[in-house]
Amino acid sequence: MPAAPVLSIEHVGLQIGGARILQDVTLSIPRGEMLGVIGPNGAGKTTLFNLISGVLFATEGVVRLNGRTMTREPIHVRARAGLGRTFQTSSLFNGLSAIENVRLAAQAAAGGGSLVTRFPRATDAATRLAADRLDEVGLADHAQSLAGGLSHGDKRKLEIAMLLAMDPSVILLDEPMAGVGSGDVPGLMEVIRTLHHGGRTVLMVEHHMEVVLGLVDRVAVMHHGELLACDTPAAVMNNPTVQSAYLGDPV
Amino acid sequence: MSTNSSTNLSSNILTVRNLYGRIEGQQVVEDVSFDVPDTGVTALLGRNGVGKTSTIKSILGLIDRTGEVTLGGRRVDRLPTHKVVQLGVGYVPEDREVFGKLTVAENLKLAERSAKPNRALVEKLFPDLVQRQAQLAGTLSGGQQQMVSLARALLNQNRLLLVDEPTKGLSPKIVGEVAQALLIAARTVPILLVEQNLQVIRQLADRVVVLSGGRVVFTGEASELLDHPERIQRFLGVHSGSGQADAAVPA
Amino acid sequence: MRSLWSRPVAKITAGAALVLFMALLPLLNITIPGIFPGATYTPGTLQLLAYAMLIAALALSYHLLFGLAGMLSFGHALFFAAGAYGLGIVLRNFSPTWMPADVTFIVAILITVLIGFVLAALVGSVSLRVTGISFAMVTLAFAQAGSVVVRRNPGGQTGGEEGLTLDVSQVPDSLVGVLNTRNLYWLALAVLVTVYLVVLWVEKSRAGHVVAATRENELRVRVIGIRPYFVRLLIFSIAGALAALAGAAFLLLQSGVSPRVATPDFTLTLLVIVVLGGVGLRWGAVLGAIVYTLLDQRLTALAGSEFIAGLPDVLRIPLSQPLFILGTLFILVVLFLPGGLAGLTRRSAWPHRPKRGSGERMLETEETI
Amino acid sequence: MSTVVLLLITGLGLGALYFLVASGLSLIYGLMGVLNFAHGSFLTIGAFIGWEVARRLSDGSWWALAAAMITGALVGALVAAATEFFLIRRLYNRHIEQVLVTVGLALASVALFEGIWGTDPTYVTSPSWLGQTTEILGARIPNNRFMLIVVAVLVLVAIVLFLKFTRYGLIIRAGVENRLMVTALGIDVRRAFTLVFAIGGAAAGLGGVLASIYYGYVSAHIGGSLLIFAFIVTVIGGLGSLAGAAIASVLVAVLQQFANFYLGGTGDLAVVLALAAVLLLRPRGLLGAKA
């Protein structure tokens, strides 16, 4: 792959009170790639996302985003540098309306998001952008609903609308299908494809194999806090290390 | 929805009818109904985030719930958690939840509900714990912590065990030991087991209950699910062959 | 918070009419026995109403902290005291000869408000390092330190236990004396309206939305690229400045100030007011302040009455302590009326609003720093 | 040298008082997440009733003092347990409301104390030995400081032994770590709540009697003013940590004494500055649970 990596993780590890949660993970992700991260529960997938996004700081190794070293930078600095993420359980401003959720993200990305001297208006750029993004994920009808009152699937879509509004270059999706009824899966897959459009790089932890295999360029397999393999889906599934270590099936 | 509940109600130790669970106002269990017979292992399956753990917690009252739960013919859905447990329910939580700042001995002592705890069984199953009884539980390995968690449940005379993902994040050798311990326990007490490792399910489960989108979509004998790869694929999202090379096969 | 930018004209009209009515009150002759000590044009009643309005302004500034941003501060009295003492001290020490007296007076008030802002920025910059219960305790400690300083009477400026008496020579004549209570009443009304408008401004601004979002989900705010610390600090400082403004007007109204307003107990009273009125609503804070002040005044009158004096000890002692009755009432409201007084109407009018008060989140997000 | 010794031992004595209040606060917060504003009132009522009993027995004798201490502890425990049982329990897991209720209780109870015992301080008579001094390394130390230190150490040891060696102690320690899991083992953790309140109330009530010896009087506000320092102590020590509370009590009180003496009576301010410094450098407190 000729493109310079947009995200590179070099020998990253995490130790908490003597316990090794993650060790020696090295990944280099070129711009525009969609990468699936799989592995049994407790393998360290979410921890890896937390280290990349700054929710936790790596105790070893280096995280680079667009060439900038981010290992010790706080969450909001990484977000401003173009990193967006979702969480395993949907994480929204439940007491605010759907459009306000998205508008906050749009404002933050545009700068001056927390000024006392500026007011949100129905006609301003951020609101229009927010409305467009809601429309894009199919939530235009719910713009004024409280985020906390939306269904599981709609909450997921709202989170993605927020990501779209931020327009990050790298996106981490932590189990975007978790808790979503099977009826909503195809629609949500479509929305995730939208995210990937325009050269965005997407990393996704997901247990739905058909989702992973249908979307991703490469698959990273985690096990016991280590990266077992990272390759095309076909190669990974035929990799003997993966087969022998990855006992049982991910359900 | 096929709820092939047994015709003879008296042979069920646990019946769950129209169970709803919520966490902070969010619906996480939706209209779930199933039975657990008074012998053998019933596996509660489903994709990640589908509400298996929440179902277990709702049964125990660890999260807000409504609906009908009967244990050995007695309604327990209005009882606080400790009362439900005192009626003879052993609980092995997801992520083990041992008290890290208490010693192994203290962890076990805390769990003893009767004057005559079954220490002999625990000592036989987990000789390692006897040696480490003065050690702080927080300093144990994941596998050892799981032993403590299991031992806490097995110390008491129970009518039902609720075991939530006991092999999560454990190495293959420990997975085998945990499965062995559960197999021995299952001779004397019925178990409702949440598990993601298909091998372990094959080894232990007599019956299966499958959740999807917060609801029960399949119940039946274990073989009715496990011998039908297309059902496994449909309900659990896993491409399943047999034996070791189960992981997942490229599409 | 549902319809952000649709401000119905009716609402603005009703608000303006209410303010106009309040402004005309000193010219009217309305008697409500049992609530007001006399007709509305009498100095006694005007004094009481002005007092209530200043407490309402203070409660509104606290609403910005607790209701909007979910910051449970136990030290807000510090800034009110800073306003009251600050204006007194500034007036005493700041009298440039080249400046007309009235201008000096206005500049002194502006300086006082600035003091409130800067002091809050300093206190906030340390306190906001922590959240939840720790934040509550730390703000309490700062308020206590302020209280100690005021009582110590540094440089003879605060008057120690005696309190500070307003130096009327520096105050425009129109604001001095019982006969001018009417003007003080209008001043208090102006302060309340100003504070209300500033609070409204902040709430509707982007910053207001960001702190509301932070109250809901702090981690989420960070993830979209905003550092909540500075927005919170800004809100904390604005609330401090508004409290100082109310404090300054309080000094003028009372012609002095006692160290009581610097005590953490005074903040607790404020908390009682906001919760009594209904957390999360601007007019809840105003309503709570007015009900509380009138109740306090009436209960004090009741405590001194012959009826109470004639009761047996078991009844006389508790009933003669207004704060005992108010404290008990407060406990009952918390136990049985979660939305406060405003919640009584809210429950029927907007059933879809989240029921719980907003401060809740602050404690839960403690782990996320 | 003698001044340093005097300040040090007096500081230890004051620290003992802080600890008696802070230990309960810290235990209650650790187990239940409740910031208890009414804790000062447990102290005040313990002091008032303790001395009422002492006065009726024989003022100034040792056994009247012992009776006052026992009564103070019992009253504190009873009032605290009742508070938990009738008010806090109703608001299970609603932390803000729990704090608000204790705020209301603090306001109401102080007003009630003023109604009953008046607004002026009530002076107490303790055994005359406590009013005398003992010379150590040239410093003349008021004897009551020694008693404060001994009692606080005994309370600390008793709490530690209780936590370490009794079943309820085990439940409380486990509950501080993970309350839900304790209930999931079939244990009614609410009983532990009442117990923790009672223990904290007993320590505070006992502290009330001792505080009135230290100050020479009881007043309706004695608990409230100590409570603020106890809050500072718990934050500096790390919320929920008993050992942290003990260490921070001593540090805060000693600092306060030294600043009062050497820096012109600025002890209170020095304490607040210390709090600010701790927060800036180590927001979790000295022995705070989360690293």
Image (tube, rainbow, N blue to C red):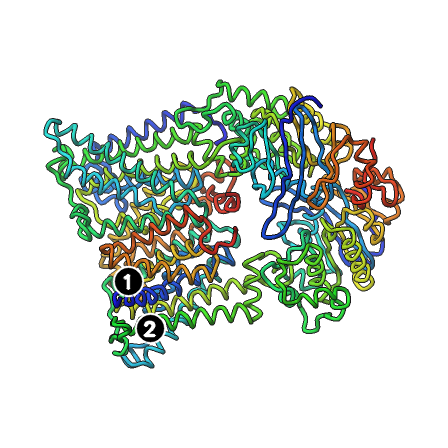
- Residue B152, by quadrant, is bottom right
* Front-lying residue, D263 or C194: D263
Q: Are marks 2 and 1 on the same chain?
A: yes
Chain for numbered disc 1? D
Which residue type carries mark 2?
A: Phe
**At 38% from the left edge and 28% from the top edge, which residue is drawn?**
C201
Per the image, the residue denoted by label 1 is D115
Q: Closer to the observer: label 2 or label 1?
A: 2
* Front-lying residue, C319 or C222: C222
Which residue type carries mark 1?
A: Gly
Disc with the residue nearer the chain's start (2 vs 1): 1
* Front-lying residue, B56 or C127: C127
- Whether residue C330 appears in this view of the structure is yes
Per the image, the residue denoted by label 2 is D146
- Residue A251, by quadrant, is top right
Asked whether, in this view, residue D8 is left or right of residue A182, the answer is: left
Task: Give residue B100's position: percent from left, percent from top.
Answer: 60, 58
Chain for numbered disc 2? D
Secondary structure at numbered mark 1: helix
Asked whether, in this view, residue B83 is left or right of residue D265, the answer is: right
- Whether residue C316 appears in this view of the structure is no
